[in-house]
Amino acid sequence: MTGANGTGKSSLIRILAGLLRPFAGNVMRTGSLALMDDHRALDDHLPLGQALGFWQRLDGCITPDAAMSALQLQDLMDVPVRFLSTGQRKRAALACLLNGGSQIWLLDEPINGLDAQASKTLEALLAHHCDGGGIALVASHQPIALSDQKNLHLPDFAI
């Protein structure tokens, strides 16, 4: 999903996630849903391993090591979240997304703060998720290379 700042990309994602109410109509969905946006879901005071562990237990994740390895977070498990860079925090948020096991992913500007390698990893994770039958709605100003993707330019749907 693309569009200039202020066209409603983030608002639409928050409506779909159930965090905002739509002005009109309603949202109906089936399946589990996961949201990744810029709002911090990890406790700044905990080491990353403990902060991720909270979400892993909540989501019932039984194989967290695969996400940690894919996102190169293993060496950061003892570092307090508040000391992580923007890119490291973003990768940790992606680990939460992977570990959640949700069918539907809502991602708001997921590439912001990621270096080139982490961006490629994100693209690979998105492709794997969608190839496995999952759905990903991504709001981004930066291109994401995926086969079979549909680009929704949000202003084209404005009333």
Image (tube, helix red, strand yellow):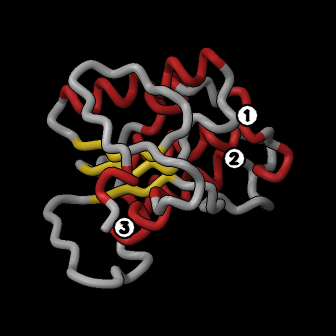
x and y, in percent, of residue 46 in the image: 75, 57
Q: How many marks?
A: 3
- Identify residue for label 3: 17
- Identify residue for label 1: 76
The residue sitting at 60% across, 42% down in the picture is 92
- Disc 1 and disc 2 in contact, CB within 8 angstroms: yes
SS category of the residue bearing label 2: helix
**Amino acid type of the residue that numbered disc 1 sits on in the rendered structure:** Leu
- Identify residue for label 2: 48
As drawn, is 86 to the left or to the right of 97? Answer: right
Disc 3/disc 1 C-alpha distance (Å):
29 Å
Between 110 and 89, the one nearer to me in the picture: 110
- Disc 3 and disc 1 in contact, CB within 8 angstroms: no
As drawn, is 32 to the left or to the right of 66? Answer: left
Q: In this view, does 13 lie above or below 61?
A: below
x and y, in percent, of residue 38 in the image: 62, 55
**Amino acid type of the residue that numbered disc 2 sits on in the rendered structure:** Leu
Please report whichever mark, 1 or 2, sits nearer to the chain's N-terminal start: 2
x and y, in percent, of residue 110 in the image: 54, 41
The residue sitting at 63% across, 41% down in the picture is 90
Q: Is residue 134 above or below residue 105?
A: above
Viewer-side label of 3, 1: 3
The quadrant in which residue 28 appears is bottom left
SS category of the residue bearing label 3: loop
Disc 3/disc 2 C-alpha distance (Å):
25 Å
Please report whichever mark, 3 or 1, sits nearer to the chain's N-terminal start: 3
Viewer-side label of 3, 2: 3
Circle 3 residues within 10 Å: few <14, some 14–19, many ≥20: some
